[in-house]
Image (cartoon, rainbow, N blue to C red):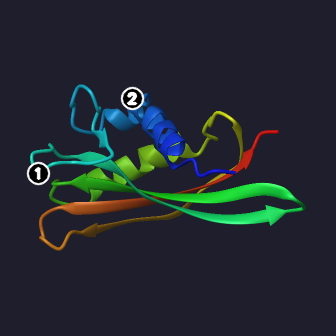
Amino acid sequence: MSLVFGTLQKAILDRLRSDVAVTSLLNQEKNTKGIYDYVTESTVYPYIVIGEPKVDAFSVKSEDVKDYTITLHIWSNYKGNSEAYKILSAIYESLKYKLKISGYNTVKTSCSDTRVFTDIDGIHRHGVFVLKISLQKEK
């Protein structure tokens, strides 16, 4: 079973970008709808960045299953945490249902961590949403 980081990232981007409950809370950049896999210093707040993926492989009764973890980063310049909290809640609602990944069965989807903290600059709020998804190759 090969790694499906790119396919999984696209599925997450597609799900979030098609969810008005998420995109209505973000900057209104036409092509990205406020959800990126990279940003520049001129990116308008608030936004989400699809961050670093990780995979843990294991076998269950000869079935090939991989546990993927992908961290989503929420960035806000709102004075307080409420904007980041709303975005985290919208992401949770959007991603609590199984993603469709071509060629794979989604065994389980869960959120393993969420938090909001003030960035080291003392101005921006940084939210973190850690998505765990177990995938099994279709036979």
Q: Quadrant of the C terminus?
A: top right
Q: Secondary structure at mark 1?
A: loop
Instruction: Please give the label number shown on residue 66.
Output: none
Q: Residue at x 31, y 43 (%)?
A: 36
Q: Secondary structure at mark 2?
A: helix
Which is more N-terminal, label 1 or label 2?
A: 2
**What amino acid type is highlighted by mark number 1?**
Glu
Q: State which quadrant residue 25 falls in.
A: top left
Q: Residues within 10 Å of mark 1 (few under 14, many from 20)?
A: few
Name above or below for residue 36 compared with residue 120.
above
Q: Residue at x 35, y 47 (%)?
A: 87
Count of residue discs = 2
Q: Residue furthest left?
A: 42
Q: Position of residue 31 (x, y in %)?
A: 26, 27
Q: Position of residue 82 (x, y in %)?
A: 28, 55
Of 96 and 101, nearer the camera is 101
Q: Position of residue 45 (x, y in %)?
A: 18, 46
Instruction: Please give the label number shown on residue 41.
Output: 1
Residue with the mark numbered 2: 20
Q: Residue furthest bottom?
A: 120
Q: Residue at x 31, y 47 (%)?
A: 48
Q: Residue furthest front?
A: 2
Q: Residue at x 22, y 46 (%)?
A: 46
Q: Residues within 10 Å of mark 2 (few under 14, many from 20)?
A: few
**What amino acid type is highlighted by mark number 2?**
Val
- Label 2 – label 1 distance at C-alpha: 25 Å
Determine whether label 2 and label 1 are within 8 Å by CB: no
